[in-house]
Every structure is written in C-alpha cells, then in structure tokens.
Amino acid sequence: MFSMKKKTADRAEIYQTTIKSIGKSAKEFLKENMLVLFGDEAPAGLKDYCFGIEVRPIQGEIKVGQQVAIDTDVFKITAVGNLVQKNLVDLGHITMRFDGSSKADLAGTLYLQAKPIPAMSVGSTIKIER
C-alpha cells in the first residue's frame, strides 16, 4: 500500500523545515551547544539570536528515542520539554540543546545527544523522524 508519509532510511518523518535566515548573533549559542529556532513571528529583540525557519505542521508526537536530522547529521532525542510540540506548531520556536540530558529542565527545549553541531546555512534542512 502506498504511504503519504515521507520516509528516510526506513524512518517516518514527522516534521521538516528549512532555515530561512540566520540572526547576526545566532551562531553565538552554538558555542553553548544550543540552537534556537523561531518562525517569522520572532520578536524583534530575539531575531538576532535565532535561526529563522518555516513554520510547518507536525505529523505526530515528538518523543524521546526519535531523531533529529540536520542536513546529513543525525542526533538522537534524549528529552523533550513539555512545550516543545506546542511552541513548534504555534511559533516555530524551540531551543535544541546538544548535551544528552535525559531530563527536560526547560519546557521549550528539545534535548539531543551530545555531538558537535553541524555548520548550517540558509537552505539547511531540519527533520524530526520516528
């Protein structure tokens, strides 16, 4: 039977977006193992610190054990803040923290395995896959 959901190496994609802009100070957070995403509605005071993305619908629930692919680099999700799903859908806003935490200390943060964050540019893709 034909499936409408996109699959990448036998993994079902539940979210996909593209980086549209990079705030002039956004890469500063990368030094702290953090990536801040925000859609077009980012407040003026925050835009400089964010990677601007397209706000897209989510096809399922974001859970521990899934993965995030940034271009060709893949990171396991280790914890999910209780506002990640809502903020991503409503605002395109979440913080990704690459520290391997198993406890979500911040409600709007998606925690990922500790690995170097790849270089990103306008046009880079971010996918969440189950």
Image (spheres, rainbow, N blue to C red):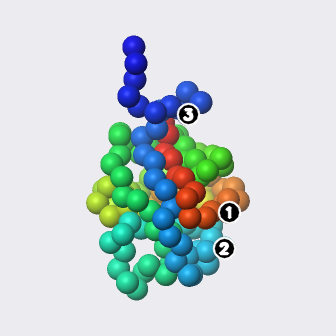
Q: Which residue is depicted at the point 42% across and 80% down?
A: 46
Tag shown at residue 31: 2
Q: Which residue is depicted at the point 43% across and 46% down?
A: 15
Quarter the N terminus occupies = top left
Q: Amino acid at mark 1?
A: Ala
The mark total stands at 3
Q: Position of residue 98 (x, y in %)?
A: 60, 60
Which residue, given by chain and number where applicable, does mark 3 sit on?
8
Mark 1 in CB contact with mark 3 (< 8 angstroms): no
Q: Is residue 102 visible?
A: no
Q: What is the quadrant of residue 81 in the picture?
A: bottom left
Q: Nearer the viewer, mark 2 or mark 3?
A: 3
Q: Amino acid at mark 3?
A: Thr
Left or right of 93? Residue 51 is: right
Tag shown at residue 106: none
Q: Nearer the viewer, mark 1 or mark 2?
A: 1
Left or right of 105? Residue 55 is: left
Which residue, given by chain and number where applicable, does mark 1 sit on?
119
For label 2, the crowd category at 10 Å Cα-Cα, with few meaning under 14, some 14 to 19 and many 20 or more, is: few
Q: Nearer the viewer, residue 64 or 129?
A: 129
Q: Position of residue 88 (x, y in %)?
A: 36, 58
Q: Nearer the viewer, residue 125 or 108?
A: 125
Mark 2 or 3, nearer chain start? 3
Q: Amino acid at mark 2?
A: Lys
Q: Which residue is depicted at the point 32% across and 55% down?
A: 89
For label 3, the crowd category at 10 Å Cα-Cα, with few meaning under 14, some 14 to 19 and many 20 or more, is: few
Tell which residue pokes out farthest to the right in this image.
116
For label 1, the crowd category at 10 Å Cα-Cα, with few meaning under 14, some 14 to 19 and many 20 or more, is: few
